[in-house]
Amino acid sequence: MASLEGWSSTIELHPQQPDHTGRACVVNSGAYKLRPMNSLLLLQGRVIDPSQGLDAVTDILIRDGEVAALGPDAAAQAPPDAERLDATGKVVCPGLIDLHVHLREPGQNSKETIATGTAAAAKGGFTSVVCMPNTVPPIDSPSTVALVHERVASEGRVNVYVAGAISKGLAGEELGPMGSLRGAGVVAVTDDGRCIQNNELMRRALEYSTMFDLLVMDHCQDNSIVTDGVAHEGYYSAMLGLRGWPAAGEELIVARNILLAERTGARVHCQHISSAGSVRLLRKAREQGLPVSGEACPHHFTLTDAALAGSEEFWREDGQEVLISRKTSAALPFWPAYDTHVKMNPPVRSAADREALLEALADGTIEVISSDHAPHCNYEKDVEFDYAPFGITGLETELALALMQLYHAKRLALNDLIARFTTGPARLLKLTGKASLKPGSDGDVTVFDPDVEWEFRREHTASKSCNSPFYGWPMKGKALATIVAGRIVWRDPDSAASGSIQQQNQTTPTSKRKKQT
Ligand SMILES: [Zn+2]
């Protein structure tokens, strides 16, 4: 059930119309932006901006949707009616970007919609997402891209970039119209959910992509090895009688993609890397300077396959250091064996694989954290493990789990963690105006508290679906305000109530209407 709690009353969504500056709000890069509004002054936050190596307590002024000033002079330049946000004691950084999100529109509105999916993104601190093309119909033509853009313009709360399909109908048999998809504004192509098995077709796709300088993203899965596997092939799959999904099924395709990237010069991005072997391949290829990259998801670097045997097994075997903020008197989160909320593709793997992912994120071998936010209806997940669809929701727990496993675990400095969510994805996607707080950049900002403790609760989720394994988990670190083009599209109601973030001088012109969902 989507919650309206915390939504700013100043949201106004008419992005297709020019704003008062006469600037159209549909940008050439393919994202639809919310219409900029009046000025916003962020005061005395700890501003961490990896794009310029900045970590300092200072002010930011956003005007007409762009960063107008950064530094001690920002407040002096603010017009008298500027909205003010006191960010004292909080981290202020460029808006977070998630390049792997399933918004499920068109065609799967019972799982998620652009309205609810972008609401979950805003609540998680994300100002931009890339939506995957495995919709109904698939996003494999310019008209479907246009349909998504139109829906985002009327319903979206954050910037949405579109990934187009590599192959027609995601069938893996014939290349899609990459040039016209690029013309329609896609920022990448992928058959995510599926993997192109035919190596010759993949080679052609990569050669073709270089003509348009388009990033090719791949869900790495060799079907001849994985077949109908549902769980990481290892001790737990054998013990529980679940069909194995071996790590080699991913690593073979990662190796193929590296070889083809070397031959074609195309930029290849391996999605949701899950195994230590994939990390080894990627690290070596990047040391050689090949144009390959990878991403890791919080469920893969937090959970292990012990979770398939139930929570008790997980906490005993692999979970001791995960819940850093748990009160010793509090009960550990519970789930049963064969819980379908621990079923994802690729599967959660061994503790050694999880460790390799954390090391890869720490040393920069993996430069992007993504959610693979994959909503499914309750009735779809409430079946035997074998029959349940793969995937979990992730946008609302992504930042906290990353902070817990990387920053609080002392593996990664805050600046580098923020880079995995900002400059990392922006560089791959060649997004202009994003992932920076330099004056002239888009006014997309995330305000978060890395230390606030909270519990992720089912009834508070903004997503339309509830297929997360993390309900009841004590979390540490949370987005408190999400700002898109100078608009506050999400504000944490608890922090606003406690006064930690307050709007000091809000102007509420009568023309503004409350956004209903
Ligand atoms: Zn995938």
Image (cartoon, rainbow, N blue to C red):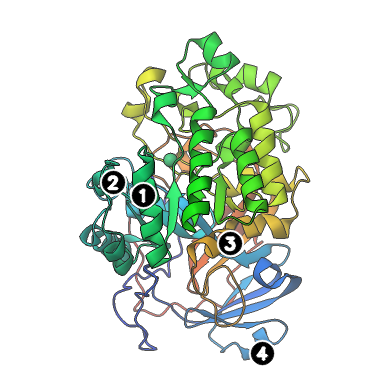
Instruction: Return the x and y of residue 300 as percentages of the image width and height.
Output: 58, 36
Q: Is residue 87 visible?
A: no
User: What whole-number distance in Å separates the C-alpha atoms at marks 4 and 1?
Assistant: 41 Å
- Seen at 33% across and 28% down, the residue is 380
Determine which residue is flagged by label 2: 135
Determine which residue is flagged by label 4: 76
Q: Are marks 4 and 2 in contact (CB under 8 Å)?
A: no
Q: Amino acid at mark 1?
A: Leu
User: What whole-number distance in Å separates the C-alpha atoms at marks 2 and 3?
Assistant: 26 Å
The quarter of the rendered structure image containing the N terminus is top left
Question: Mark 1 or mark 3, which is nearer the start of the sequence?
Answer: 1
Q: Is residue 153 visible?
A: yes
- Seen at 65% across and 33% down, the residue is 354
User: What whole-number distance in Å separates the C-alpha atoms at marks 3 and 4?
Assistant: 28 Å
Question: Mark 3 or mark 2, which is nearer the start of the sequence?
Answer: 2
Q: Amino acid at mark 3?
A: Thr
Question: Mark 2 or mark 1, which is nearer the start of the sequence?
Answer: 1
| Quadrant in the picture for residue 215 | bottom left
Determine which residue is flagged by label 3: 422
User: What whole-number distance in Å separates the C-alpha atoms at marks 4 and 2?
Assistant: 48 Å
Q: Are marks 3 and 4 in contact (CB under 8 Å)?
A: no
Kind of element beneath mark 4: helix
Q: Are marks 1 and 2 in contact (CB under 8 Å)?
A: yes
Determine which residue is flagged by label 1: 103
Instruction: Return the x and y of residue 321 as percentages of the image width and height.
Output: 74, 32
The quarter of the rendered structure image containing the C terminus is bottom left
Q: How dense is the environment of label 3, judged by Cα within 10 Å: few (below 14), some, or many (20 and up)?
A: many
| Quadrant in the picture for residue 73 | bottom right
Kind of element beneath mark 3: loop
Q: Amino acid at mark 4?
A: Ala
